[in-house]
Image (cartoon, helix red, strand yellow):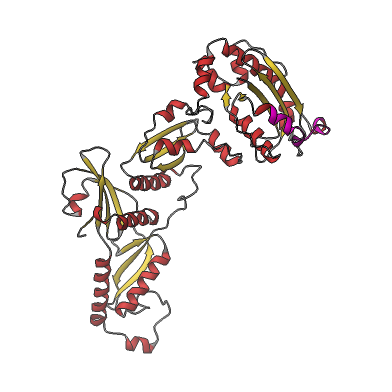
Amino acid sequence: MLYAIVDIETTGGHASANGITEISVYVHDGERVVKHFETLVNPQQHIPRYITALTGIDNEMVAEAPAFDEIADTLFEILEAAVFVAHNVNFDYSFVKHQLKQSGYDLSAKKLCTVRLGRKVFPGLPSYSLGNLCRSLKINIENRHRAGGDAKATVKLFEYMLANGARQHIDQMLKKTSAEQWLPLNLEKTVIDKLPPKPGVYYFHNSKDKIIYVGKAINLKKRVSSHFTQNDPDPKRQNFIRNVHKVSYRQCATELEAIVLESTEIKRLWPRYNKSQKQPLQKYALYSFEDNRGYIRLAIDKKKKNLPSLYVFNLLNEGLVLVKKMVEEFELNAKLCFLDKTAFTSKEQHDLDPPVVYNTKMKRAIDALNENLPTFALVDEGIAAEEKLCLLIERGSFWGMGYLPKSYAIASTGELKNFLDPYADNDYIRNNIYSFAEANPEKKVLLNS
């Protein structure tokens, strides 16, 4: 087996927006180096000052160097027949693969990370960065932060690992079923191995244990793994992956429970890398009140915490459509429902039904609204055999969910709420529950509110 031990210098940290300024490849057969390829590369873009300060490579040095396209065929020929080895391999591989693709070559090599390998062969060291690891193992690095110097140090490190029992680990890491080739640098394979193939919600944590992403899954192990199997060079994607240091999860009984929990957790935690469902929701409500002339009126306003309402909704337009339907169906007055906010004319005031007549129509409209707002429970299998999952919709809005004893017979909402945890309602959750209820009518239990 051949190993291509690679190091590159670049103009920045992300493959899709930056270029390679230098590359060094040592081809190793497991015993010795059999080939070496090294060159400066003209990235065809400006090299920032901070990069020059780190590597010593400036724009003048690469002005006469070949563009990547000029070395692509040679490089591809070397790499396609070997295992791609690097210290933090996903960084180097993402750049080389992206640049080769731009030149018309599709690299699909096995990868081996000497950081991950070092943790297995020499566990318990304080740091596994190239400089610190070589220092711990007394491996000298010449020409640090240049491709040739760092690649040569990685060769020495690789040979030292081979001499200390690395082959057994390499064989396992290169298996198709192994996650070692694609996992983020700071995420251990055992974390993925422990994930169950069950529905649930998963959390990605950064180095400070802060949750930076929340997702839901039908199969936790498969879904979490899918985040890392594609070597996308997009800067945001690469930055996200590099920040993942830990995965935690909460198993759910069903996908619907996971949908509800994910939406709730995104709004509670506001994770950095979640984009959808992060818009702050302005809750509105439909209220009724009696004015100083004795008329019962309808009004839409922002939801008040301690004021009873007829109906709660997230979109103002949803409430307006509802009130318009009530006005048309029960011949209510648009001005008494604040759909028309102009003042009453004398004629309009004269033609208005007296309060006792008008309020009868209004009460019929409110009664019909209450009848049309469903109250029901959705009952499904629980995680454990002796329990069942329950989600409650009360008067058209999501109230909460939880687990009931398997033998419990649902009789009333008041008693049922003792078993459930209240959750915040929103359109996304409600729409998913209604869709599930429509597709699974046998799991729906109608209740009186």
Residue 61 is situated, as x and y percent measured from the top left of the image, at 81, 30
288 relative position to 125: left or right: left
Observer-nearest of 213 and 191: 191
67 relative position to 416: left or right: right
271 relative position to 334: left or right: right
Quarter of the figure with residue 133: top right
Q: Residue at x 44, y 41 (%)?
A: 214
**Taking 26 as reference, is 243 above or below it?**
below
Residue 221 is situated, as x and y percent measured from the top left of the image, at 41, 35
Quadrant where the C terminus is found in the figure: bottom left
Quadrant where the N terminus is found in the figure: top right
Observer-nearest of 100 and 77: 77
Q: Residue at x 60, y 11 (%)?
A: 160
Observer-nearest of 289 and 19: 19
Tag count in the figure? Answer: 0
- The verdict on residue 65 being magenta is yes
Q: Residue at x 43, y 28 (%)?
A: 191
Q: Which secondary structure is most common in the magenta stretch?
A: helix
Residue 76 is situated, as x and y percent measured from the top left of the image, at 69, 31
Quarter of the figure with residue 159: top right
Whether residue 150 is visible here, answered yes or no, is: no
Q: Which residues are magenta?
A: 61-77
**Taking 84 as reference, is 136 above or below it?**
above
Residue 130 is situated, as x and y percent measured from the top left of the image, at 61, 20
Whether residue 388 is visible here, answered yes or no, is: yes
Quarter of the figure with residue 57: top right
- The verdict on residue 401 being magenta is no
211 relative position to 298: left or right: right
**Taking 389 as reference, is 41 above or below it?**
above
